[in-house]
Image (cartoon, rainbow, N blue to C red):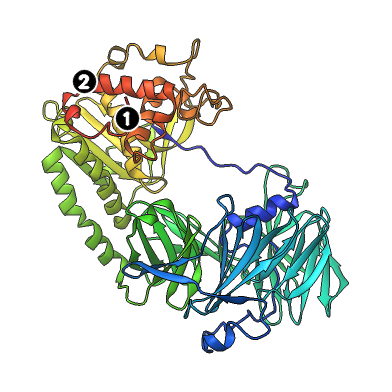
Amino acid sequence: MVFYKEETFRRARFRKATLILLAGSVLLAVLYAGCTLFKPSGDPEGTASSSETVLEEKSNYSKYSAGFTTIEGNVSKYELGPLDDREAPEVVVSGKYFYFLCRVSGKYEIKKINIEDPSDSGIAKIDGDEEYFCLLSDYGVRVENKDEVIFMDLELNVICSVPNKEDIEYIAPYKDSYIVLQGDDLSILKDGKLEPFRRLNQNGYVVMNQQITEDNTRLLLNDNNNNHEGQFCFYIYDVNADKYTEVKNMGFNYSADGFYDITPKRIMVRKLTEDQEQEYENKYPGNIATSFFDGERLYLCDEGDLTIRYYDPFRQTICSLSDHEFARYGVNFRGLSGKKLFFILNSELYVIDTASCEELPVEEFNIALHGKIEDLSTEIRDKYSVNFQYGKDAAKEIRDNVEVTELKEETRVLYSMKKISEYIRRFGKEFFDDFRYGTSKGLYVLLGGYTQVTNDGAKIDAGGVAFRQGDVFYIVLNVTNDDPARNFCHEIMHSMEHNTDSDTIFSEWKKYNPNGFKYADSYAAGTDEKYTLYGPDEEEKYFIDSYSKTNALEDRARIFENMLATTKEECQINDYPHIRAKANYMRERLCKLYPSLKNTDIFRNLDG
């Protein structure tokens, strides 16, 4: 069984510098601290001549030529020059300009790149002592040392400076002036002077996102103070109305004017101007690694087939933009300018020209990419004796202690079947023939939705379940919650053990565990992270995770899925001698039980 443990937030008190780094390196469109003129610098409409607007006579930037190289097809890369290895560059897109902040030889520099004409761009150095650091946002540059914090716009004109206190400083446009947040004090900055404005109703706020309009400013606030033990609380703060709207279901994906969240079934979108989330059906069939939402389209990196696409949840259309292998690593989308999509990967800046890419309806795209359910199901059944079932046909096969929500979304069904079939082919026909007895038609893979198992008197959410009834072997998969192919690999290990006497085939398993170790032998009882990859002792790694310590069957299934459903580079097993020893023992015993596996690539990721 694959078991899901609900993620929980732990309350944390952040220092200012920690939040600055978090905002700069992780949150896509987070404007934790920034500055601006109300209208973005340059030509946000992209209509003016670049030679007239990029490098004006009094510009703070000197001339710079940014190299631009076509990688393949519609994908190109900006040559940005040497960077400090430990510094992740920061990039914002404003109109037809890039602003690119990086650290070189311990000093910060900012490059202003004309998207339309990279040869006519600018560069400027940001001076400071050894302990200073900078942060770039969509609205400006923040420069901080131990004494002061200086805010500049994107043209490096100083807006203001404030003493560097323990309180978090934040600045944003507000009507014809600026608002400045220090602790719980909100001030107005006008003509270079700070005037008290109002106090927020609690201290400890951090600004996560903002929406600037001509007549108002709205802030998305994270309140992580001591009044909310064990959780983060989020509010949308309307500056004009001095009103707080609590956001209970907060997603950490930020869009241009709000935030959004994605599940395999739905996409939730909330604008800062709205009290309620809008919900849209998600028919995208892939495995989303990273994403960017422009208010209409979801630009995403599919780590399953290494493709960058956009998906329109309103019109239910999909467009493939690039299948370059950099999609494997999950790109960091930075924004759009017209038809050009910009993202960053490994400290390099890339652009995809989407103008010539073809948009298809979801169902048409899905069939073109994966085939038809009936054709794929028939092929796998006839060639490998593996039977796919979903919907009502699957639900009637489920045994009493397993509850599965009926799966009706054919897009998700087809995608899951395609990914699982890749592993079925790797095992081969001879392997699956070992699961046929008497009149049995072989292994049944039942595709469902939300899955819950009653075990030890407790109801447990599960990603998959394997069981045997008489001569028939079943694997139940929740294909709406996680990678169905990985879960299939986990459950097929259980099926192999159901097809033999585990105590006999793995009779020496105990000696591969720590001396005196005992499994929990209960799904209801939790286990700690001692001896796991997440435990404190680097030398004592015997288990993939705490779930592996439930029982020996789950231990072996966790190892098997990590060994099989990863690339050679991603496979962690070889890095830990105790786990590698277990995996090699499993290979030896499984090849004895299923000799056909010797002629497959199932164990290709194992060393030794």
Q: Nearer the viewer, residue 258 or 306?
A: 306
Residue 74 on image: x %, y %: 34, 70
Residue 208 visible in the displayed image? no
**Looking at the rendering, which quadrant does residue 318 occupy?**
bottom left
Q: Pointer 1 and pointer 2: residues touching (CB < 8 Å)?
A: no
Please identify the quadrant where the N terminus is shown.
top left
Amino acid on which disc 1 is placed = Leu
Residue 579 on image: x %, y %: 41, 24
Residue 500 on image: x %, y %: 24, 19
* Pointer 1 residue: 606
Q: Residue at x 15, y 38 (%)?
A: 384
On residue 253, which mark appears?
Answer: none
| Total residue callouts | 2
In the picture shown, does residue 502 fall above or below 297?
above
Q: Is residue 280 left or right of residue 358?
A: right
Label 2 crowd bin: few (<14), some (14–19), many (20+), radius 10 Å? some
Label 1 crowd bin: few (<14), some (14–19), many (20+), radius 10 Å? some
Please identify the quadrant where the C terminus is shown.
top left
Amino acid on which disc 2 is placed = Leu
Comparing labels 1 and 2, the label whose residue is closer to the camera: 1
Q: Nearer the viewer, residue 120 or 339?
A: 120
Residue 193 visible in the displayed image? yes
* Pointer 2 residue: 593
**Looking at the rendering, which quadrant does residue 213 occupy?**
bottom right
